[in-house]
Image (cartoon, coloured by chain):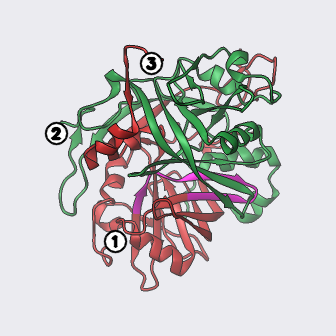
Chain colours: A green, B red
Amino acid sequence: MSSNNDKHLTTEHIHLMETRYRAKLINSLSGFKSANLIATKNTQGHTNLAVVSSVIHLGSDPALIGYITRPTSVQRDTLSNITTTKEYTINQISSNFWQAAHQTSARYSENESEFELVGLTEQYIKHFSAPFVKESRLKYALILTDIIPIHANNTKLIIGKVTDIICDKTALKSDGYIDIECLNTTCISSLDSYHTTIRLSRLSYAKPGKKLKRLSVNGEIID
Amino acid sequence: MSSNNDKHLTTEHIHLMETRYRAKLINSLSGFKSANLIATKNTQGHTNLAVVSSVIHLGSDPALIGYITRPTSVQRDTLSNITTTKEYTINQISSNFWQAAHQTSARYSENESEFELVGLTEQYIKHFSAPFVKESRLKYALILTDIIPIHANNTKLIIGKVTDIICDKTALKSDGYIDIECLNTTCISSLDSYHTTIRLSRLSYAKPGKKLKRLSVNGEIID
């Protein structure tokens, strides 16, 4: 049973909550969320930038990354550009530009570029039309591979294959681990709270009956 | 173009990486991941506990939470129990038991309970068969609503509807925001690094042409 410090909310409580109260509460449940900007360009050359907290790892081989979108949201331009051009970039949000990143969630019109409006800089690589965010220190280009409808609430899982990764050299460790903490990558809780992190440690691969070892950021055994 | 500090990895580089190197690198791209334990019980009464870093918010009304699973992984018992019983719980991992949580990823046999093996405690509510993790200060019960196959890499998106939430009272703010940082909720980077957080601040709802305001944890304007 619950302890005295615990609040127990039931289906009935959740159902009766005021809409925005419920949105903040339910958005707190999944834990810390990744903080990313998705950048696209439409066929007329207009760029678009959207803060997204639902980017998720799907697999390493092939390298697939997904995110969840609600077709009617302010991200509709992003989805429309991805569907048309098949190209987009995902850019980790660092504490150096977290407020500019959040500002991209304002409901700007289709022909306004969030880059210019919030003060972030477009960056390009050869043979890829979508812009990167220059200020981001870990970012990657994706080609759309699949859009999976989630009928339960009319959202979609957008899946892309990673083609190009641009990463600050200092963060890439010899075993493939990228120290996103040293890049000041932020995370999000609920709808509007941004956080930086403090590493507890890396941990060794868990095996039955074997004590875990703490690992340094470089993957070396600490104790 | 990239700056001199940047490493640019192409599709060819990614393709040629050693498997574990690529897994650590690609798992770093999505940003910080949520850290949760999924708890289930099979029809014989054996409990199961699995650390999962792919739990994701899908929607607030109805309250839907998803996670990604690879059917052949160590999480196969979890998936099998969810499919059979339709009931499971998700429990945020705090810095008070992060190492025990990571240890649940060891390949234990089907009839061994990770609860006992890693030293965590089962907790139950009425009318729900799956256990909660007593040590977790924010946790919720879910009823399976959908399993969506992701054909691109043979993974699945498991979707559940939240029925009961158990949360430390002190963390629940008057506007619905839950201060998961004060609960010492951790997040994960790549495959094996655990982190606690430091709040930058909450931010006001973004509107075009309007300066963002920083908000306290209680949602009050700071500046």
Left or right, B129 with reference to B193: right
Q: Mark 3 or mark 1, which is nearer to you?
A: 3
**Figure check: B42 above or below A45:** below
User: Image quarter for residue A44?
Assistant: top right
Place residue B195 in its image quadrant: top left
Residue B15, x across and y down, in percent: 34, 45
Q: Is residue B102 magenta?
A: no
For the residue pair B173 and B185, the one nearer the viewer reads as B185
* Label ID, residue B2: 3
Question: Mark 1 — residue?
Answer: B113
Q: Chain under label 3?
A: B
Q: Where residue B188 appears, x then y in whole percent? A: 42, 42
State which quarter of the image contains the C terminus of chain A: top left
Mark 3 residue type = Ser
The circle on residue A223 is 2
Q: Which residues are magenta?
A: B50-66
Residue A149 appears left or right of B78: right
Q: Nearer the viewer, residue A54 or B38?
A: A54
Q: Where does residue A65 sit, x and y in percent of width and height?
A: 51, 46
Residue farthest along the front direction in this orientation: A127
